[in-house]
Image (cartoon, grey):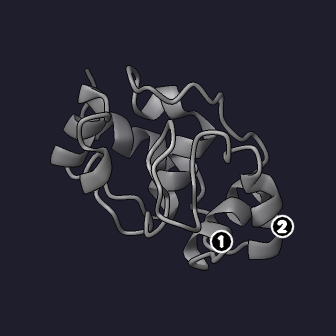
């Protein structure tokens, strides 16, 4: 399992991506659309990402039965999706949630991370 120490350690070495380009982020998010929706609130293979900023991990009501135990534990342990936590998770999902269900290998470019987070923060509409 993992704990707050692992997350704190990861966040200590990763820069928080506070600024980005939401328009460019929409293009980056195209990599995510097979599994996630960010405009209608509908769950797909993964949970809807509408309103993900500020959400506690593993708590979206419509997706509760589908989250991995590790994702729910992370949320119970205090993991909230803010810029820093999303940056760490989107860079390397398995490092943050080792037995999570997300198969995506991660975004490696800082610019892509900042842009996709800006897109999610912009409350995208269809």
Q: Note whether 115 is above or below 28 in the view shown.
A: below
The residue depicted at 61 percent of the width and 72 percent of the height is 18
For label 2, count other residues whose C-alpha is less than 10 Å away and answer few (under 14), some (14-19) or many (20+). some
Residue 102 visible here: yes
Cβ–Cβ under 8 Å for marks 2 and 1 = yes
Residue 57 visible here: no
Q: Earlier in the sequence, mark 2 or mark 1?
A: 2
Task: Residue 22: give x, y in percent of width and height.
Answer: 74, 74
Task: Residue 57: give x, y in percent of width and height.
Answer: 31, 50
Q: Note whether 53 is above or below 64 in the view shown.
A: below
Specify the quadrant of the image occupied by residue 66. Answer: top left
Residue at mark 2: 24
The residue depicted at 69 percent of the width and 60 percent of the height is 116
Specify the quadrant of the image occupied by residue 124. Answer: bottom right
Side (left or right) of 5 relative to 47 = left
Side (left or right) of 71 relative to 28 = left
Q: Secondary structure at mark 1?
A: helix
In the image, 115 versus 125, the foreground residue is 125
């Amino acid at each position: 399992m993992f704990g707050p120490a692992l997350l704190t350690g990861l966040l200590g070495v990763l820069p928080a991506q506070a600024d980005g380009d939401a328009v460019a982020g929409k293009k980056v998010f195209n990599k995510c659309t097979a599994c996630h929706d960010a405009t209608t609130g509908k769950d797909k293979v993964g949970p809807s990402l509408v309103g993900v900023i500020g959400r506690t991990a593993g708590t979206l009501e419509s997706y509760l039965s589908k989250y991995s135990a590790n994702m729910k534990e992370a949320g119970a342990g205090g993991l909230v999706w803010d810029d820093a936590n999303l940056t760490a998770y989107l860079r390397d999902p398995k490092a943050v949630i080792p037995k999570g269900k997300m198969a995506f290998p991660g975004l490696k470019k800082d610019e892509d991370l900042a842009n996709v987070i800006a897109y999610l923060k912009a409350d995208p509409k269809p």
